[in-house]
Image (tube, rainbow, N blue to C red):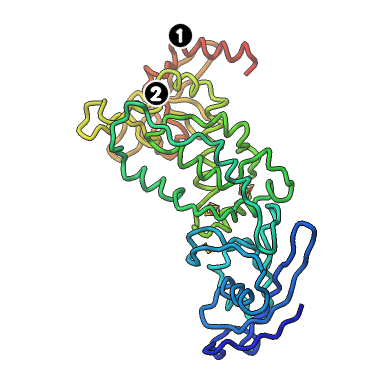
Amino acid sequence: MSTAAKTRPGADEATAASNNGKIVLQVFRGDPSGGGEERFEVPAVEGMVVLDAIHYIQANFANDLACRWNCKAAKCGSCSAEINGRPRLMCKTRVDEFVNQEIHVAPMRTFPLIKDLVTDVSWNYEVNKQIPGFTPAANESVPYRMRQEDVDRLYEYRKCIECFLCQDVCHVLRNHDDKSVYYGPRYMVRIAALEMHPLDTKRRSGLLHGAAGVGMCNITKCCQEVCPEHIKITDNAIIPLKERTATDMYDPIARVARKLRPRHEPAGTDGSPDGLAGTRLPQRFAVKDVVRLKSGGRPFARVGAVRQDGKLEVWVLKMRGTQQHWKGPKVINTSDVTNNYGPLDDVGIGSKLFEQQLMQHSEHGE
Ligand code: SF4
Ligand code: SF4
Ligand code: FES
C-alpha cells in the first residue's frame, strides 16, 4: 500500500530530518498466517520518535494497525520492535536518526506473532515463575539492613523494564528457536539480583546449571548492546553467575564450606553495632581466610596478613602426594583472588574433613 499523507497542521517541516518534510516507514502488517511490509509517508515533526509515526499511521491511514505501548517514556517496556533490523524501543528511537533512509519497523522475531507489531511474550512470564523468589532467613530482622555497596550493586539489575529486547537478540533463543534450554539474558539479570542479595538464603546454582541453562550463553554480549537501561547484562550478571555455578557445582572446597557455614549470618546476631560485621563479602579478607588464587593453576592459599596498603600476604597450599604444606609468604593484590571461602577452621583445609571430601570426590571420579 502506498499512502501519501497530508502534512499535519503545525508540523515543522524545516526541522524534520527527512525527504521534503516526510518520513517513509515500511511497517510490517500481518498475522501468523503471513504478511509483509506496507509503506507509509508521515509528516516529520521535530523530536518525533518512531512510536509517534506509528500513532500517526493508526490515526490517519490504518486504524487496525496493532502495536503495544503504554508509557511513551521508555519505562514500561511495551513498545519493543525491530527498527531497521535492530531491537529497540519505538518510543526511544528518534526518526531523525535515519536521515534519507526508510524506516523499517517489524515485530520482535524471537516471539510468536499475534498481529502486526504485537508478539506473544507470555513465555517470559512462565520462565519468571520458575525462579525461586527472594528468601530471607526466617529470623532476619525487619526492616532489612544492607550495606550501601550491596544496594548499589543490586540497583543495576533492578533497572530492568522487561522490554525483552535482550531476549529478542539472544541467538540461543532467536536462531536456534529452542527456548527449553535457556531462560535468556533477562532472567540471568533477575537471578543475579537474587543471588547477589546479601540477605537472600536460597541457592540457585542447580537451577542455573540445569533448566536455566547459563552454560548456553557464549558471552557474545549482543544482549548488553541492545539493553535500553544500559544494564551490563553479560559483564555484571551472566559472567558472575557462570563463575558461581562452576564453583558451586565443581569446586569441592566450596561444597564443604557451604555445608559448614550458612550463606550469611542474619543482621544483629554477631554483636556488632550495626549487625553487619558478620557478613562475608567476596572482597573482604581476614587472617586465616582460605582463598583461591587466579594464577598458576588456581591454587588455594590462606591469608597470613592483611596489610595497611590493602594487599594480602598469603601462604600457598602445596601438595606432594598426600603431603601438604603451606609455602610463603607471598604478597598479592585482592584482585588476584577469585574466591574467599572464609576462615580456615570453617573450611577445613588440612583437616580430616577436607581430606575425606577429597577422597570421596576422587572415588567418584570427580
Ligand atoms: S551474551 Fe549470552 S545471553 Fe547475551 S545475547 Fe549472547 S548468548 Fe545470549
Ligand atoms: S535486561 Fe535490559 S534489554 Fe533485557 S528486558 Fe531488562 S531492560 Fe530489557
Ligand atoms: S511505550 Fe513504554 S517503553 Fe515505549
Residue 119 lies left or right of residue 282; in this view the side is: right
Q: Is mark 2 within 8 Å of ligand 2?
A: no
Which of these two is toward me, 227 or 351? 227
* Quadrant in which residue 13 is drawn: bottom right
Judge the density around disc 1: few (<14), some (14-19), many (≥20) Cα neighbours within 10 Å.
few
Q: Secondary structure at mark 2?
A: loop
Q: Label 1: which residue?
A: 352
Q: Secondary structure at mark 1?
A: helix
Instruction: Look at 50% across and 11% down and name the residue there.
Output: 355
Q: Label 2: which residue?
A: 262
Which of these two is toward me, 221 or 178? 178
Q: Position of residue 135 (x, y in %)?
A: 42, 32
Which of the two discs, 1 and 2, labels the residue nearer the N terminus? 2
Q: Position of residue 185 (x, y in %)?
A: 58, 47
Q: Amino acid at mark 2?
A: Pro
Residue 216 lies left or right of residue 33; in this view the side is: left
* Quadrant in which residue 7 is drawn: bottom right
Is residue 53 depicted above or below 203 in this figure?
A: below
Q: Position of residue 227 (x, y in %)?
A: 55, 57
Outermost residue to the front: 63
Which of these two is toward me, 365 or 143? 143
Judge the density around disc 2: few (<14), some (14-19), many (≥20) Cα neighbours within 10 Å.
few
User: Quadrant where the N terminus lies?
Assistant: bottom right
Is residue 264 depicted above or below 124 in this figure?
A: above
Which of these two is toward me, 225 or 315? 225
Q: Position of residue 276 (x, y in %)?
A: 28, 33
Q: Amino acid at mark 1?
A: Lys
Instruction: Look at 38% across and 18% down and name the residue there.
Output: 346
Is residue 124 depicted above or below 20 in this figure?
A: above
Instruction: Look at 30% across and 29% down and name the residue there.
Output: 278
Residue 171 lies left or right of residue 319; in this view the side is: right
